[in-house]
Image (spheres, rainbow, N blue to C red):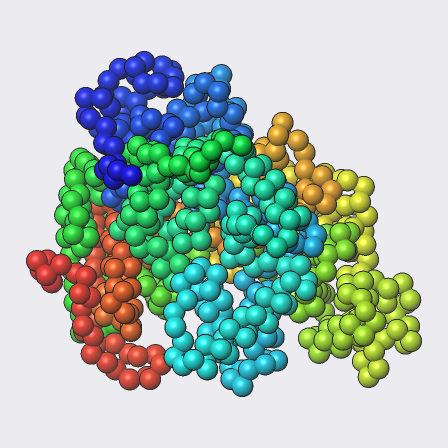
Amino acid sequence: MSHDPPVKIHRSESACAACAIPGHDPSLDHSALDEDQREAVLAPLHRPLMVTAVAGSGKTTVLVERTKRILLSPGVIPHQVHLSTYSRSAANLLRMRIRTGLPTHVQHLAGSIKIKTTHSLCLAWLRQHWRAAGLSHKNFLVLDEHERSKIIRSVVQRSAIDRTSDAVARLSRYITQRKSKIVAPCATPGHEQEMHAHFLAYEKHLAEVNALDFDDLILRVLALFQTCPDDSETQQLRNAAVSHLRASVSHMLVDEFQDYSEVQFQLLAALMLPHGSVTVVGDPNQCIYGFRGALPRVFDQFSSKFKYRLLPSEPGGPGSASTVATNLVSCCLRRNYRSSQPIVDFAAAVSNREHLAARHAAAHHPSVSVCGFSTEAEEIEHVITAIRAAVACGRQLGDIAVLVRFNQERVRVAQTLLHAGILCRTRNEDAHDLPHMRRLLSLLRLALWNVEGSAAAAVVEEDTVADVVKFRRGVGPKTLQSLSSAANMRGTSLLRYLIDLNRSAFSRAMMPPNTRLTSEGEAALRWLAVVVVELSASLMTDSPTERLLCLAFELTGMSANTDTLLSGSADEVDECGAGDLAEGSPSQLVRASLQLFAANTELESQLDGGEVQRGSPGLRRLLDYVQRSAEEEVADKSSPSHLTVRTVHGAKGMEWPVVFVLNCVEGSFPAAQTSAALLRGERDIFYVAITRAMDSLVITFPRTRLDHNSCKVVTCTPSPFIPLSHEVA
């Protein structure tokens, strides 16, 4: 077996006439691409392609142009083209750019491409192949983070000596690490055994109620590709599922590949290695999700794994499987189109990697400054003064971002800026963010469970019911716990018990002993039972999902929002208060409502023929879609009148003309107690922070600060990631 290096396309070859490229459509114009981008876009479509890129170098452009080229190639079926992205907003952006970039007569093809996160793709596949995945029903429950935490807490409280919140957090991390295959050894063998026992108890709990958590989605699909020699029936189901999956994906393109975990990479290899038509794009210096299992050297693994392809022997023929070279193509995007020259130079010094500036001079004077201050108070006061000066020079607040490392810092900084009279936005405003919308989604989930008979975990169902009854008053957690115990004694679910209780007019014979309901509490539970039954009836008549949403709004008393929703536009909603920070304000609810209906419309456009979503399948798709978006990092549209305050992880994929990075000291960059093995990932986090800036970058740090755990003033050391060559003001 030879070990040839990855193939490089010569410059003269990549710049040749478009008509000379096999599979190239002459209607596509790549003249606006630079040499590096053109090399990647025009690489042979049948070969594995690995594109490494610096920040701001046009990774999305390359993905869009290569996808367009794939779509217009002979024999390609659009719905067999898959793009794996890191968020729903990234998927929407890619689809829009692909559609608008195609010739008018073929723009409809963009609607057929599967553009989703890896977890969303796996969820859709598991809904199809649930038997092969070992699930007891296709309507399995997918836990959100809150539901997962409740089950972990119940496991710890039942079997652990240490029942504190720290113990719950440790078990949560252990489960994530186990499922990402990055398990660190515990302090003692006994501790390892205890954590493993808790892990098994957690998994048993999920299996009993036919539930999966976020990490299970990929693991269950990966398991389909593994052999099961002791169960021939299961193996047959797995073989059929694998054949279907491989046949359904002709081309796979992966965005932000540096964030792939070991499990995600194994799935990509198992799915795509047999035919090798795969493109991965990312920046090795932006691997910031190590705590989730992201592989620091995933590009090296891709280069090694996809260099050769296993060819099975002919059926009935002699010999075993053989390997052939795939002629892997490797490209590098080195020109930064986002940032000004000083920022590009600073980023190159931080990453120890070549960057080429490609921008013209900024409209405002480009600069990078590193400023040290005696205290945190002086640091934030300087930032406030600098923000006001930028606005006085013509900047809008929407041009400016303040980035910090940790969420607690984000909250403190936002409060300080608001007190100083600077309007700021601190988080996304998706439908799942607002209390009323969470309750509405919980109500829809209860109706779906009622129709499908899903066996939700008792702790999850109780929590969901508790969320919904907050639409009314009079039912506390102790009452719900008592009712849940009574339902369990009767061998039924809490929801079914409440419906039966309402039909019996809340007879004392059915009520648990020593449980007294106020008239207000009884009215709340009657309302819940009636509303769930009415929504369930609508589901069983196969009503369109949009009509079901309207009905849910009316039944919950939120119909005033649906009036605006059905008669107004998103732009009109934004005009009536896009920056409101108060949860539950009318403008927020209307905006969230629009997002929910827009999500349903988008799902309909992705179905074959744009069919209308209906009944239980349509509602299940919508709830899965919204739930997955709640788990993902979703970029938010900036408002011109509001400054943005975010953590570095929350700023991924975004950019602003002016960026302040605060508290750049050891303990933040890098985080405290960072091992040598994780130091590279910490440097990547700092690199992501500084490369969000387009024109002006301000790095600040205090020389002393208050430790909020010990309430003592401690001395700070500037971050070692700040280049020594850069002068500190």
Residue appearing at x 64%, y 44% in the figure: 237
Residue appearing at x 51%, y 82% in the figure: 164
Q: In this view, does 471 lie to the left or right of 37?
A: right
Q: Nearer the viewer, residue 122 or 691?
A: 122
Q: Which image quadrant for residue 389?
A: bottom left
Q: Which image quadrant for residue 248?
A: top right
Q: Nearer the viewer, residue 466 or 320?
A: 320
Asked if residue 35 is positioned above or below residue 669 in the image, the reply reads: above
Counting from the top left corner in percent of width and height, residue 333 is at: 24, 37
Q: Nearer the viewer, residue 575 or 241?
A: 241
Quadrant where the image shows the C terminus: bottom left
Counting from the top left corner in percent of width and height, residue 548 is at: 72, 44
- Whether residue 568 can be seen here: no
Asked if residue 545 is positioned above or below residue 442 in the image, the reply reads: above
Residue appearing at x 69%, y 55% in the figure: 136
In the image, farthest residue toward the front: 318
- Whether residue 311 can be seen here: yes
Counting from the top left corner in percent of width and height, residue 76 is at: 48, 23
Q: In this view, does 244 lie to the left or right of 15?
A: right
